Image (cartoon, rainbow, N blue to C red):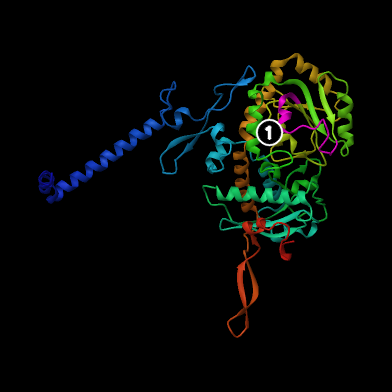
Amino acid sequence: MASGATNRTDMWRPLLRSRRNLAILALLVVVGYISFAQLGLTHDNSGGGGGGGGGGRGAAYGMIHSFGGGKTAGTIKTQQVPYDGGGGKAGRWDFDVTVDRDNHSLTRAQCDQTFPLLYHELDRAKAYWKGQQGDKKIGPEQIDLKWSGDGGLSGMIYKQQLYVTHSRGLNHFGHWKERSHATLHQIQRAILTSPEPVPDIEFSIKINDKINLTPDDPSVTVWTFSRNIHDPVMERVWVIPDFNWWTYPRVAGAFGDFQRQAMAIQGDNFDSKRDQLVWRGTVDFNLDLRGPLMAQTDGQPWSDVRRIDEDAGDPFRITMPDHCRYKFAVHTEGTTWSGRLKYLLSCHSVVFVHRLSWYTHLYHLLNPSGAGQNYVQVENDWADLPPKMDELIMKPAKARLIADNAASELRDKYFTPAAQTCYWRRLFEVWSSVSFEPEPWEYIRSTAGDGGSMAMERRVKGMTYEEYVFHDSSVPAGLR
């Protein structure tokens, strides 16, 4: 064996002694590598045609639900997005909701081409402030929360790190602590999963239902969960995904997980659902809206509309996934907006919605008519609800189409957790373009050396996200 190995080595020595031969050998290696890479890329992009062996993601990826006969089957379209695979190769990337529903690492190009209609509220807010200030940047004094009572926080992103720089009354009321933490978790996730660096920014958030923004100081702006479209003052706000997109334990767990639960009910088959209209809620507030709903549905054979008490023992109380067992559901606003609508529109049901006053960042996607209709609009007195229900019961194909549109365009696209993260990162980008550059440092006096002399020490202001959420009920005084 040793002798054979020596002979083979000797055989190559004459070739290796010649520089010309070495150059030819190197060229052959390079040509072979390029040919192999091209062969692999052609295979990856072939798409598999009629389904062949599933060659790569192009063949079997991009499958999303189609809706026919009341249940999911096959595909209706493939979202193809240019993608370099992280290595500079000009391949293709397909958004597959069965895999990418919770994909928080989409690039900016993938977000733009998969969710082209997502950013309406950001475009609106940017245009508003450009109209107010021209090229002048939103300044630190404009995001100061001195006008605000409880339920607010200020934050900063600096070098990919999230900080909380100020908070107002978020720990003495349990719901507000949950809301603020869930919102911060979403921001942190959008930063950590971003394929591209996010910009340095400072911002303020109000997590109350009513933020009590007034006309007194027209330069003030803030991020918040919804805006009253009839109130000119609310043109000044930037609408962000609400806390439910992370989780709201009294309603459901992680939102993507709720969507999967909804799809598991009756096998996501619309025709297998109960032929009734469901609503559960209290009429202790917004009685002018909810009272007429109770009156118009009382005694109807298709109605399962019931008032419930806040007591958890109420026999008519049902879980949020249980709403998805019905073909028809009702959405009503609460104190302001209600987070329930995103859940109902993920049920693959027909959702009746009155004329809304409070808009979230996604309500521009609601379509009340035409081939793309994805919900049923009714008047605020609900007088047209009974005839519209009677019509849809008599025309099940029309009802099924509305439910299918809501599932395919909203639940499986714009209402995915992946889309919300795309929205957050676009918010960072747009906000950075119209607001001031953060000043991250603060200076504090400290004792230096053995002599006890005083010195000024520089540190990043605020508290890191990690430290802030670690605290349970006690927050340092400077952050209350």
The amino acid sitting under disc 1 is Leu
Relative to 225, say whether 116 is above or below.
above
Residue 200 place in picture, x, y as percent: 59, 56
Relative to 108, say whether 342 is above or below.
above
Q: Main secondary structure of the magenta part?
A: loop
Residue 58 place in picture, x, y as percent: 45, 30
State the extent of the magenta-drawn residues as a range.
Answer: 309-328
Give the side of residue 382 with respect to residue 145, left or right. right
The local crowd at label 1, few if under 14, some if 14 to 19, many if 20 or more residues have their Cα within 10 Å, is some
Which quadrant of the view contains residue 445? bottom right
Residue 473 place in picture, x, y as percent: 73, 57
| Residue 326 among magenta residues | yes
Residue 424 place in picture, x, y as percent: 63, 46
Can you say which quadrant of the picture contains the N terminus? top left
Choose between 58 and 301: the one closer to the eye: 301
Give the side of residue 372 with respect to residue 359, left or right. left
Choose between 364 and 65: the one closer to the eye: 65
At a point 24% along the width and 42% down the height, the residue shown is: 29
Choose between 236 and 322: the one closer to the eye: 322
Give the side of residue 378 with respect to residue 273, left or right. right
Can you say which quadrant of the picture contains the C terminus? bottom right
Give the side of residue 424 with respect to residue 359, left or right. left
Residue identifier under label 1: 365
At a point 69% along the width and 16% down the height, the residue shown is: 397
